[in-house]
Amino acid sequence: MTKIGKLYAIGVGPGASDLMTLRAARLLRETDVVAVPEKTLGKQDSFAWAIATGAVAAKEIQGETLFLHFPMSRDVSITVPAWQRAAAAIIERLQQGLDVAFITEGDPSVFSTWAYLQEELAESLPQVEVEIVPGVSSITAVPAATGVPLADGEERFCVVPATYGIEMLPRLMEEFDTIILIKAGRMVEPLIELLEPMDMLHCARYVSYASGDNQEVYEDLRQVPQEHRYFAMVQLSIRGRKGRLRHGKAA
């Protein structure tokens, strides 16, 4: 009986290829199959692949390159069958004894396509050995771009998808010092409408393509142009507990 191959979930980082880890680069060179998520079926349009091949040239990747379609949709009648087909393609190779490396932007454990695959594989091939290789997340790449710390001392931060959570912001701003809003590109105007009456607009910084050559940072949401609304996040820094460890009370 053929031994089942090993599955790797590899985070390739937020955009800059030289932020990809040494372990990720080694596994891309050594693994039998590199599975790559693509947005459009058959187009090989993969941000994760662009990041990975910026660090490890495609000619250095000796194994099979397997593109898997992950449609950009909220319609479960579209997404779930696609995830199942992706899982089946990986399982087919694992059952042949091949090791498979699935790459994903950022970190596999943070708002990643890996989560969809992991759930499908847990049901269909629960005995497979899985190793998750962490990567630099956009959640830390964004404060690196803005120069504003995510948290220090006794501060607290949270991460919320902007497309689902801006109605929670007034409550979250009472509880957290920094709020990272992911998928914020389409939510710029609603954020302005919410934050401006609260006199909190000055706390918001907008970053698109964090760490990449095309990174854009805006300290005023009103200045964000329509064409820069991709791979976008907003860092909302209230930081009410800043200085507590230094001075013994909130600054």
Image: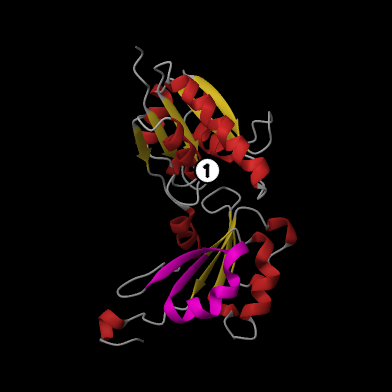
> Is 232 or 104 nearer to us in this picture?
104
Q: Name the image quarter holding the N terminus.
A: top left
Magenta stretch: includes residue 201: no
Q: Which residue is mark 1?
A: 113
Residue 94 left/right relative to 65: left
For residue 239, above or below residue 76: below
Please, what is the three-letter code of the amino acid marked with disc 1?
A: Thr
For residue 44, above or below residue 149: above
Does the rendering let one see residue 69?
Answer: yes
| Residue 49 found in image quarter | top right
> Is 26 or 44 nearer to us in this picture?
44
| Residue 158 found in image quarter | bottom left
Q: Residue furthest right?
A: 226
Q: Residue furthest top?
A: 1
Residue 130: image location, x then y, percent: 36, 34
Task: Tell me which residue sits at (31%, 75%) in the image.
Answer: 154
Q: Residues within 10 Å of mark 1 (few under 14, many from 20)?
A: some
Secondary structure category for the residue under label 1:
loop
Residue 119 left/right relative to 44: left
Residue 133: image location, x then y, percent: 37, 39
Does the rendering let one see residue 60?
Answer: no
For residue 186, above or below residue 196: above
Task: Tell me which residue sits at (39%, 17%) in the image.
Answer: 97
Residue 234: image location, x then y, percent: 56, 65
Residue 27: image location, x then y, percent: 38, 28
Residue 198 left/right relative to 42: left
What are the residue bounds of the magenta stretch?
Answer: 156-180
Residue 216 left/right relative to 30: right
Magenta stretch: includes residue 168: yes
Task: Tell me which residue sits at (57%, 37%) in the image.
Answer: 83
Q: Name the image quarter holding the C terminus.
A: bottom left
Task: Tell me which residue sits at (73%, 56%) in the image.
Answer: 227
